[in-house]
Image (tube, rainbow, N blue to C red):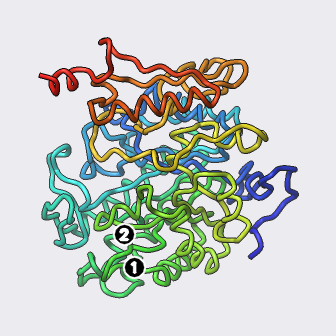
Amino acid sequence: MPVKNPVEKAASPYPHLFTSLAVGKHTLQNRVWMAAHATLLVKDHLFTDAHLDYYVERAKGGVSAITMEAMAVHPTTQPYKGKAFAFDPRMVEQYRKLGDAIRPYGTKLLAQPWHRGRQTNSVASGVPVWAPSAVPCSVYREMPHVMTAADIGDLIEGYRLSARYAREGGLDGVEVHGLSHGYLLNQFLSPATNHRGDEFGGSLENRLRIVHEILDATRQETGPDMIVGVRINGDDGHEGGLRPPDWADIAAALEATGCIDYISVSQGTYLNRMMIYPTSPEDHGYQMRATRVITEKVSLPVVGVGRIVHPAEAERHLADGDCNMVALGRALIADPEWLAKARAPGRAHPPLRRRQLVPRLDCRPGANCLHPQPGRGRRGQTGDGHPEAGGASEKGRRDWRRSGGDAGGADRHRTRPRCNSVRARSGAGGSGTVMGQGAEPGGTRRNRDLA
């Protein structure tokens, strides 16, 4: 299947990866998109300086677009206290600051307004969770408030305000979220969770109504020049849910509105969260089969995700026509220079195989991974190839340090593998150190076991 919007390819081992792509009235400099993911760096419903540093590192690495983490469109969706509010006018200044820092690298910056619906609880918000029907989430098990017509109007207004503030803040675009991963708009679309008897339930046309109204409101606020996209599922993956042919029909209906410039495809709901963020046994590119069904149905650019670890994998999916862009999450958390290394022959990519970056299901601050220097925090403390980073020697060797005490989770069962990992990396050309206060690794756990 030919790549959409082809232009002359640069000389590279990965020619499709480094081909530009027209999205709406914008041109993206390559085919790598940073997928939205929670950083837990928010404070008082706003971004922080740590956010700025985090996104700048990925822009410096060369990604063509960054979708910032999902931001609430209404107070009823707060998975934790302080969650960023896209409907808050204070966001305008935040966006301007972020845009000024990222724009010099040619990276497009997009907001991602969203609502979780039933897939959260009322602990942080103090108000009932919302859903189209009285069907509780299998994870949170809280009976939701069935949304009224007034509630639906408030939700649409939240998306409208989110788009308005994105425009006023100088962002390049808005990615409407909530149709994927079992979130609120997905709950309206799926017959498994939408049992309404009004104009927002029943037929597919009715179930799509709320999405159409949100997209209309979004485009009215952004105008024709900003990028507008949607994040949808390619497969809900459960009985009674929407499957790839259903989502292909939905994608075609969304394209027909004329409101959107691209479609980003993921998978899963909270009934099967490992379809959203899989663990190591899952095949690389596991979502691409369903994504291709949508790519073949629409003419808009399609963004695909799903355990894409190495540039060769991304290149293959692009060349085969599974999607038109690849979105990376954990790979870019672990290595902000993933794309820069793909462009420079001989620069190794970090191993993300068995010791794969894993998602945090709790709510403690900071993007977390099982990989050295994930590129978070202040500039000068991240990356391994920027001049200010100091993570590599002149010969490109890495100094590896592993905690041998409680901070590293060491105990008598884990200490030996940790020491062996440092020893192996040292033999590969770097230097390795196991650190701890005591003469032997293991910390207080070791002392407890010996008592």
The tally of labels here is: 2
Amino acid identity at mark 2: Asn
Q: On the image, numbered disc 1 is attached to which residue?
A: 242
Q: Position of residue 152 (x, y in %)?
A: 30, 65
Please report contact status of discs 2 and 1: CB closer than 8 Å, yes or no.
yes
What residue occupies the far bottom of the structure in this picture?
Answer: 203
**Residue 31, above or below 252:** above
Q: Nearer the viewer, mark 2 or mark 1?
A: 1
Amino acid identity at mark 1: Leu
Q: Position of residue 150 (x, y in %)?
A: 25, 64
Nearer the observer, 37 or 313: 313
Asked if residue 323 lies left or right of residue 362, the reply is: right
**Residue 175, above or below 137:** above
**Residue 411, above or below 106:** above
Quadrant housing the N terminus: bottom right
The numbered mark, 2 or 1, whose residue comes first in the sequence reads 2
Checking the image for residue 186, the label placed there is 2
What residue occupies the far front of the structure in this picture?
Answer: 450
